[in-house]
Amino acid sequence: METLLKKTRKQQIEEKATHLFKTKGYAATSMRDLAQVLGIEAASLYSHIKSKEEILQKICFRMADEFFEAWETVANEQSSYTAQMEKAIIAHIKVITKDSDASAVFFNEWRHLSEPHLSEFISMKEDYEGRFKNILLSGKAQGEFQQVDEKFMMLTILSSLNWTHNWYQPKGAYSPEEVGKRLANLILNGLKKN
């Protein structure tokens, strides 16, 4: 029973910290701020977590794992590179919209990770971005996509998708799948060879 309570408290701490990191920024959020939001003494936090950075690591690496897990639907797509890119965009949007606070922290605060976590995170980021570049390269080679600079295009695609956490509303007009399809349609219409 106590293990369950500690786990629940840890989840509460992570949830509140995620919201604070999003609204105040990681650097501006203190352990005292977190304790105050939780209604406990700052010293009590240390019985649940080692440090503020431990929470940031959990958020960043959990989100990275979710992006890679979502990629499985993309890897299974064999019909065309256009279909792969559409699935990649939809999968990406689904992860972002699942938890907009964690997404904001993931995209904006990862630079505060210390070594060796920072290098590990950057390596994962480059691997993930490389998957988008590979679709673009393969699509160009097969004549599906225009001859574009794949790094520039990958950065453009991910920049437009990564901003979604700022405006997406779970109770809005569109589901994550619909948002992904609409964005994929816009992006792919610009990429497709006429």
Image (cartoon, grey):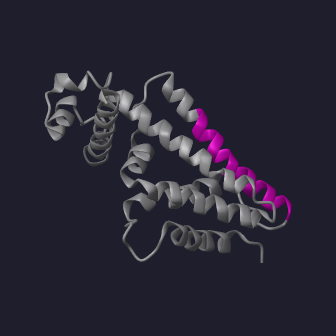
The magenta segment: 123-142
Is residue 51 in the magenta section?
Answer: no
Q: Residue farthest to the right?
A: 142
Q: Quadrant of the C terminus?
A: bottom right
Which residue is found at the position 77% from the left and 73% from the top?
Answer: 193
Q: Is residue 140 above or below residue 175?
A: above
Q: Quadrant of the N terminus?
A: top left
Which residue is found at the position 39% from the left and 66% from the top?
Answer: 170
Front residue of 146 and 120: 120
Is residue 132 in the magenta section?
Answer: yes
Quarter of the image for residue 167 reads: bottom left
Q: Is residue 107 left or right of residue 37?
A: right
**Residue 106: percent from the left, percent from the top?**
44, 44
Q: Is most of the magenta stretch helix, strand or loop?
A: helix
Q: Is residue 41 left or right of residue 126?
A: left
Which residue is found at the position 68% from the left and 45% from the top?
Answer: 130
**Residue 21: percent from the left, percent from the top?**
30, 42
